[in-house]
Amino acid sequence: DGRGFLFAQMRDTQGRLMDLGTKGSGQTPYSRFGDGRLTLKGAVREILATEMLEALGVETSRTFSVIETGEALHRGDEPSPTRSAVLVRLSHGHIRIGSFQRLATLGLTEELRRLTAYALRHYYGEEDGQDAAVRLVQQVVRKTAHLAASYMSAGFVHGVLNSDNINVSGESFDYGPWRWTPTFDPNFTAAYFDEQGLYAFGRQAEAIHWDVVQLANSVLDIADREALVAAIDGFAPTYRQALIARVLWRLGVEPLTEERDIRVVTALETALYETRVEIDRFYFDWVGGALRRPDAQGLYGAEAFTELAEALAGYTPRQDCSHPYWAGHAPCSMHIEEVEAIWAPIAERDDWSALYAKVEAIRAMGDALRG
């Protein structure tokens, strides 16, 4: 893309393809008028985003390393000049839906077939064939529906979910104006330029669904139309099932029946929306499926939480809460104020201790969530 290069590929111990790419290493053919560089603050923000998402069970690229370049960059959206860096990103794939759109727009049908076969083989272990494009769309529908659901359970707002920011491997990546919404606010946006709320918290599944439709449109010349429509129609039910699974996972309970699980998720979202209790605070206090902190009782006196408690009756905890994280006084969160507080000492005196401490706390939360 405008400032991203793929530099190397390798196989992990499970035989999966891994990509090492850079962000901020200079101009590419797609940079337009940009310099292809990355600010050090942008790199720090990507470290925080990827660490937090990994801990919360979201399939994401990982920040492999950050290399400061010594250059002074000028940006319109932060104090300038500012420090420059190159970020090295580790992921399972780098091919975007936009890659398919480009080939389709240029009428490069043979290249489109080759790219489809490549993605299907390397990301999903399937061989080429007459229905290759349909099978790829089916896989991408499944993976991206799970991605959208995981954003919702994490309270994460990516900020720019256009088709060039959706990877056909189904991983979350490329973190610019991201935010975590403190409360369950469907209209919460991350990007200052998203004035219409196109990528708001509650519209992320809709945005990702639109992107996958663009993938299907791109392969129309090499696939059966009706089969593609059927594949796209699978997004909504897959998303609903994935959302239930992700919410119950973060809540720390084992699923029961579909009817009961839907009731729990509906009651949970209603309670959080009506009361504006912080998302992270709620999951911290209710891990295991019941309010476990008497000192927090005052937060949950609303009728909506009574209904949630009734819906959760009979659920089995997935974890025993023995991890030290659960004995703390507050959840590990990632709100914008803390991001700025972590960046300030780096900018002022090259003090990275707050970042290191936060990464350690995030990883401890991840260990606790995994039980």
Image: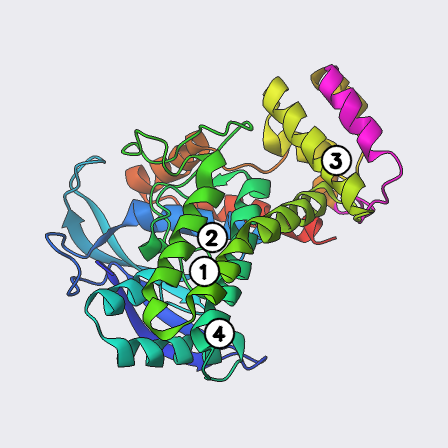
Residue drawn 38% across and 43% down? 351
Q: Earlier in the sequence, mark 2 or mark 4?
A: 2
Colour scheme of the rendered structure: rainbow
Q: Earlier in the sequence, mark 3 or mark 2?
A: 2
At label 4, which amino acid type do we have? Tyr
Mark 1 is surrounded, within 10 Å at the Cα level, by few (under 14), some (14 to 19) or many (20 or more) other residues, namely: many
Q: Quadrant of the N terminus?
A: bottom left
Residue drawn 55% across and 82% down? 15
Single out the residue that lies furthest toward the left.
Answer: 33
For disc 4, the marked residue is: 123
For disc 2, the marked residue is: 50
**Which residue is nearer to you in this view: 228 or 59?**
228
Residue 307 sits inside the magenta stretch = yes
Residue 308 in picture, x, y percent from top left: 76, 27
For disc 3, the marked residue is: 264
Q: Earlier in the sequence, mark 4 or mark 3?
A: 4
**Which residue is nearer to you in this view: 75 or 290?**
290
Please tell me in which quadrant of the rendered image residue 222 appears. bottom left
Q: CA distance from mark 4 to mark 3?
A: 34 Å
Label 4 secondary element: helix
Marks 2,1: beta carbons within 8 A: yes
Magenta part of the protein: which range? 301-323
**Picture layout, residue 58 above or below residue 97:** above
Residue 364 in picture, x, y percent from top left: 63, 49
Say which of marks 1 and 3 sits in front.
3
